Image (cartoon, rainbow, N blue to C red):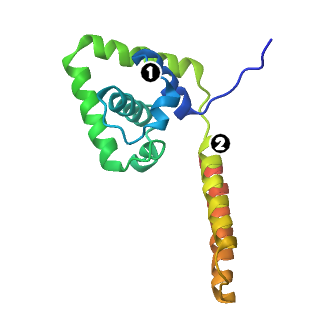
Amino acid sequence: MKPEIKRDLNEEILHYVCKELKQEPEFVLQNLNSRKKELVEVRQIHHYLKYTLTKQNLENVGFYFKKDHTTVVHSNKKIKGYIDSSKEYEEMINKIINEVNSNTVYSIRPTKRILNKSLNNFIREIKEAPILESKTKDSIKDFVRNYKRLLDYYEETI
């Protein structure tokens, strides 16, 4: 028997939205700036569901697709409008919500992994930068130390 591979909440929502709309998650993630209707709809539903299910702030909701809070607000309005105007659309959204809720263990670890990855990229860029003054190096070390504390605090509070 194969071990079950756990996906984070973003991947889980994307998986079920793509399954319902007959899209490939990898294709959606490779085309983050595409304005094709079918890809935009996947992102909008993802934003709506993540906000509805987690009540995270709008910036966190948009982070997965590299979108800002105004895009998330627009997505929520669009999807609510579709739900209000179409019983079939409402049933589709409810089906996705039920699938996500029945198959997901909510966890912030993937978010922490993403934040750690960006921190490691930042550290690598600093190390590759031209020679820095010692005062600047101390400031960077303080920043990294505070950033790691913030990650630990974030993990404890959620």
Above/below status of 109 relative to 95: below
Q: Amino acid at mark 2?
A: Arg
The quadrant of the rendering that contains the C terminus is top right
Picture residue at 44% right of the left edge, 47% below the top: 66
Q: Nearer the viewer, residue 112 or 153?
A: 112
Residue 123, by quadrant, is: bottom right
Q: Nearer the viewer, residue 79 or 42?
A: 42
The quadrant of the rendering that contains the N terminus is top right
Residue 147 in the image: x percent, y percent? 62, 64
**In the image, farthest residue toward the left:** 85
Question: Element under label 1?
Answer: loop
Residue 152 in the image: x percent, y percent? 67, 55
Compare marks 1 and 2 and give the one earlier in the sequence.
1
Above/below status of 103 relative to 61: above
Residue 53, by quadrant, is: top left
Quickly name the residue at label 2: 109
Picture residue at 31% right of the left edge, 31% below the top: 36
Q: CA distance from mark 1 to mark 2?
A: 26 Å
Q: Amino acid at mark 1?
A: Gln
Q: Nearer the viewer, mark 1 or mark 2?
A: 1
Graded by Cα atoms within 10 Å as few (under 14), some (14 to 19) or many (20 or more), the crowding at tag 1 reads some
Graded by Cα atoms within 10 Å as few (under 14), some (14 to 19) or many (20 or more), the crowding at tag 2 reads few
Question: Element under label 2?
Answer: helix
Quickly name the residue at label 1: 23
Residue 122 in the image: x percent, y percent? 62, 64
Picture residue at 55% right of the left edge, 27% below the top: 12
Query: Number of marks in the image?
Result: 2
Picture residue at 64% right of the left edge, 56% below the top: 151
